[in-house]
Image (cartoon, rainbow, N blue to C red):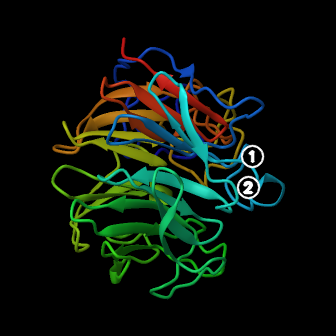
Amino acid sequence: MFPAGQYPVGLPAVSHLGARNDLPNPYQPGVDWGQLPAGRKWGSTASVTTAPDGTIWVVDRCGNSGAGGTTCGGASASVNPIFQFETSGKLLKNFGAGMFVSPHKLTLDAAGNLWVADNGSHQVFKLDQNGTVLMTIGKKGVAGPGLDELDAPTEVAVAPNGDIFVGDGHTGGGTGVGNARIMKFDRTGKFLKTWGKKGMGPGEFDVIHTLAFDSRGRLFVGDRQNNRIQIFDQNGTFSAQWFQFGRPSGMYIDKRTDTLYVADSESRDGRTNTGVFALPQTGYGYNPGIRRGIRIGSTRDGLVKSFIPDPCPYPYAGVSTLAEGVTVDAEGNVYGADFLTNVRKFVKK
C-alpha cells in the first residue's frame, strides 16, 4: 500500500492489490440505451442481465436514486421497476409495481425465470416473465440471522441443478443483524446450508454484493468491501481469492467462453474529482491506486485482458459515473447499469 500522501498525480499501471489500469479498451464510448415509457425516467439501475433468449433485463429503483430505503414504496408504488428490452433498446415489457421495497439485483435462471433480491424487504422473489410470483424466500420486513430469514439480500445465482444461492448481508450491520453469508436452498426453496461470517479471511465476507457461476459450476462471490472476488465450490469450499478485477459491484460470466466482466463502481483513494488528495485516505471504498470501470478477463486463469475505464480518471469519493451492474449480449456488446440513473451500451470497436 502506498504511504499516505505519496501517491503519484496520475494512477499507477497496477494498483496496490494488482488491478491493472493500463489495459486496452476494445469498446467505443458508452451510449445511453433503453427506450423508456413516456414520462418515465431511470432510477438507480444497479442491475442489468441477459436472458437465455438474448433479451436484456433491467431493474431500477422505480425512478428514484439512492441505494436503500423505500425507493419502490410509498409514492412510487405505482411505478414498474422491471424492464425487458431487445438489444436494440426497444422496450418489450415493464412490470412489477408495488412488489418491492428496494430492488437490488435481478438475475435469470436457465429456464428464464427472474430472481429479484429486494434488500428493502429482506426477501428474494422468483417470478415468471409476466411478473407472477413463483417463490419467496425470507420474511417480509424482517432482517434476521435465522435459516428462514435474510438481512438485505443482494443477488441470487441459480446452479445448473436448480439449487439457489443467495448473497445475504448488504448493510454490514446497519439493520442491527449484520449477516455476511451465502445461503443455499434447493430448487423448491428448502434450506440446505449456509457459510460465511463477517471478516477478511478466506470464506469470510464484508458486503456480498454480487454472485455468478462459471461453466464449471464454481460460485464467484463479489466480496465488495474486501475489494476482492472469492471462488467456492457449491458446498462452500474455498478455492481462491482475486483482487485483480477491482472492487466488485457487479459481475457477469459468459459461460460460452468463461469470460468474466466485473464492474467496479466504488474504488476511491482520497482524491477529489480533480485529482487532488484532499479527503481522508481511509474508510468506505478505500482501494488506492485503482481506476473504476469494467475489467474483462477469464475465469479459467484469472487474467484480466481489457478494461472499460470510468470517464473520471480519478478514484474520487463521489458516486461512480460508470456501471454498478454489467452484462453482455451474444455479439459481445457490454451493458452497464449505472448507480446514477442510466443504462449504457458499449459496442465493440
Q: Position of residue 169 (x, y in %)?
A: 52, 70
Lateral position of residue 59 relative to residue 57, left or right: right
Q: Position of residue 166 (x, y in %)?
A: 42, 68
- Identify the residue at horizontal 56%, vertical 50% (top origin): 286
As drawn, 94 above or below 141: above
Crowd tier of the residue under label 2, counting other residues whose Cα lies within 10 Å: few below 14, some 14–19, many 20 or above: many
Residue reaching furthest top?
349
Mark 1 / mark 2, whichever is N-terminal: 1
- Identify the residue at horizontal 49%, vertical 52% (top origin): 106
At label 1, which amino acid type do we have? Asn
Q: Position of residue 223 (x, y in %)?
A: 42, 59
Lateral position of residue 14 relative to residue 146, left or right: left
At label 2, which amino acid type do we have? Thr
Judging depth in this view, the residue of 63 and 46 nearest the camera is 63
Check disc 2 and report its element: helix, strand or loop.
loop
Name the residue beneath numbered marker 1: 64
Res. 285 visible in picture: yes
Name the residue beneath numbered marker 2: 71
Judging depth in this view, the residue of 62 and 96 nearest the camera is 96
Check disc 1 and report its element: helix, strand or loop.
loop
Q: Position of residue 293 (x, y in %)?
A: 48, 33
